[in-house]
Amino acid sequence: MAEEYLKDIQLTDRGFDQQVSDRTYVDLKVNGRGDLATLEGRDNLVQALLNRLLTRQGELSTLGHPKYGSRLHTLIGEPNNLRVRGLADAYIREAIAQEKRILKVNYISFDPPQRGYDRSTLRATLSVTPSQGDPFTLLIPINLEG
C-alpha cells in the first residue's frame, strides 16, 4: 500500500507551528547507514500535508510552484476569535484541495481559546479521507504570534 502514498525524504525538527520562511527549524533525517531517511505510506502523506499547510503560499514560486502552500501565515498577528477560525478553516481546505492524494476533508474543528491559556495558538483538528486507506486525523497548532 505504501506505493499509493509515494515516498519522500524524511524531514525532522520542524516546529509544527512555524509558518515563517526561516528553515533553521527543518532538517533532513539520516538513517543508521548514513543515508537520507525516507518516509512511505501514511507517514509520508501526513508530512506532505503538514509541509503544505505550514509553507507560505507563493514561497516556492521561484521553484515553479507558485500555488504550493497555504495562506495561514496571513493570520499572524490576528486574535484567536471566530472570524479568524473561519478564515483558517477556509485556508486549510484550500491548501488540502491541492493534494491529489486526499479525496475529501471530513471536518475541521478548532478548540476555543481558554482563559489564561495560550490564546495565541489556534488548535486545529482535521480529518481527511485519502485516496487509498482509511480516514485519519491531524492535530495542528497554528501560532498566531509569528
Image (cartoon, rainbow, N blue to C red):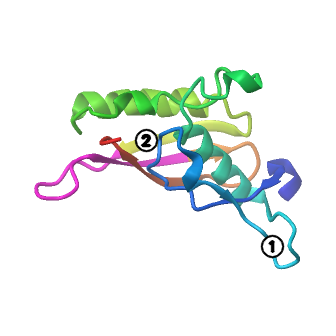
**Residue under numbered circle 2:** 108
- From the viewer's perspective, tell me whether residue 38 is left or right of residue 127: right
Residue type for callout 2: Ile
Residues shaded magenta? 110-127
Q: Percent position (x, y) of residue 126? A: 48, 47
Was residue 122 drawn as part of the magenta stretch in this picture?
yes
Image quadrant holding the C terminus, namely top left
Q: Secondary structure at mark 1?
A: loop
| Nearer to us: label 2 or label 1 | 1
Can the viewer see residue 1?
Answer: no
| Residue 7: numbered disc | none
Residue type for callout 1: Asn
Q: Percent position (x, y) of residue 123? A: 35, 50
**Residue under numbered circle 1:** 31
Q: Is residue 49 above or below residue 134?
A: above
Of residues 42 and 26, the one drawn nearer to the viewer in this rendering: 26
| Dot 1 alpha-carbon crowd within 10 angstroms: few under 14, some 14 to 19, many 20 or more | few
Which residue is pictured at 86% across the width and 73% down the height?
34
Q: Secondary structure at mark 2?
A: strand
Which residue is pictured at 11% across the width and 58% down the height?
116
Can the viewer see residue 19?
Answer: yes
Rounded to the nearest whole Å, what is the CA distance between mark 2 and mark 1? 34 Å
Q: Percent position (x, y) of residue 6? A: 83, 49
